[in-house]
Each structure stands twice: as structure tokens, then as C-alpha cells.
Image: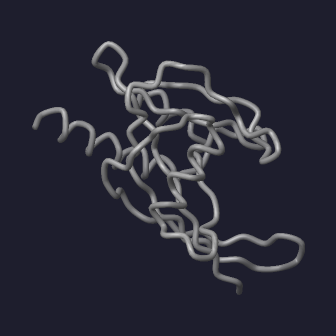
Amino acid sequence: MRRIKAAGGVLFRFNDSLAEILLIKRNGFWDLPKGKVENGESIEEAAIREVEEETGVENISIRSYLCETYHEYIQKGDSYGKTTYWYLIDANGFKGTTMPQLEEGITDTEWVHLKKAFTIAHYDNLKEVIGKANKDLYKQKKA
């Protein structure tokens, strides 16, 4: 089995004091931005790069580490084991237009409230990531 290291993020902003996160629609499913860590790149650098590339949102910053997820899949007859490292990423007040990365199969992006994100995220492991982001945002708001 071939091992892959990936990084991604829960990109958030506050809209009228409510936290929203940016979901991407990849290959017909609501997902979070993520991608492979490139040679010579730190996991944190990969998370920022992938979120920026897949959403078009720039000048973002990591707020905290959330968790890692693991899943296995088969592609073109080869088996892969993918570990993804997830971060809570601040959009730093972004109000512009997002730009889905079409060449990666991303056809849409949508800012959604955390509760809605939890219900429409396609993969169960993403619901876990979104739940951790919700807890982190709640803690930071109380501080």
C-alpha cells in the first residue's frame, strides 16, 4: 500500500458574530479543501497552499491544529493509505469572491454556518473535523 500525506483546513470567518466555514463541492460532494504535501514543504505550508489554491481565498493564517484523519482507497488498481492533517484556518475577514479550482474537480464553494456544514459534508470523517473546529471556535470565542 502506498502512503500519502495530505493537509487541509477548515477555513472560517465570522459573519454577524456567527462562525461560517467554506465548503467546496468536489466531484459532486461537499468537502473541505485539502491536498498532498509536496516535497520540501511542511504540513502547515501545504495546508495553507491547498486551501488558497482550492478556494481562491488568500492571506489566510493557521489558528490551531485540529486532528488527523486516515482513509484507504483504490485508484487505477493501486491501494493507498492517506493521512490528512487538519487545521483551523482564519480567513482574516475575507469578504471577496471565492474561486473554485476547476482543474481539481471543484465546481462550487459556499460559506455555511457550522451546523449546516455538519449536515451537508459528505464524508463521516469530515463531520469529525468540523465538530473539532466548532469546539475550537467556541473556546476561542469565550476566551
Q: Residue at x 57, y 76 (%)?
A: 40
Q: Residue at x 48, y 19 (%)?
A: 95
Q: Quadrant of residue 28?
A: top right
Coloring basis for residues: one colour
Is any atom of residue 71 visible in this view? Answer: yes
Residue 86 in the image: x percent, y percent?
45, 57
Q: Residue at x 58, y 66 (%)?
A: 6
Relative to the observer, which residue lies in front, 16 or 29? 16
Is any atom of residue 125 visible in this view? Answer: no
Q: On the rendered image, what quadrant is the C terminus found in?
A: top left
Q: Quadrant of residue 110?
A: top right
Residue 7 in the image: x percent, y percent?
53, 61
In the image, taking residue 33 as reference, residue 80 lies left or right, namely right
Residue 75 in the image: x percent, y percent?
83, 70
Vertical comparison of 135 with 67: above or below = above
In the image, taking residue 12 as reference, residue 23 lies left or right, namely right
Residue with the most extreme left position: 143
Q: On the rendered image, what quadrant is the N terminus found in?
A: bottom right
In the image, taking residue 136 as reference, residue 129 lies left or right, namely right
Residue with the most extreme bottom position: 1
Residue with the most extreme top position: 16
Vertical comparison of 48 with 60: above or below = below
Total number of numbered labels?
A: 0
Q: Residue at x 70, y 29 (%)?
A: 108
Residue 52 in the image: x percent, y percent?
58, 43
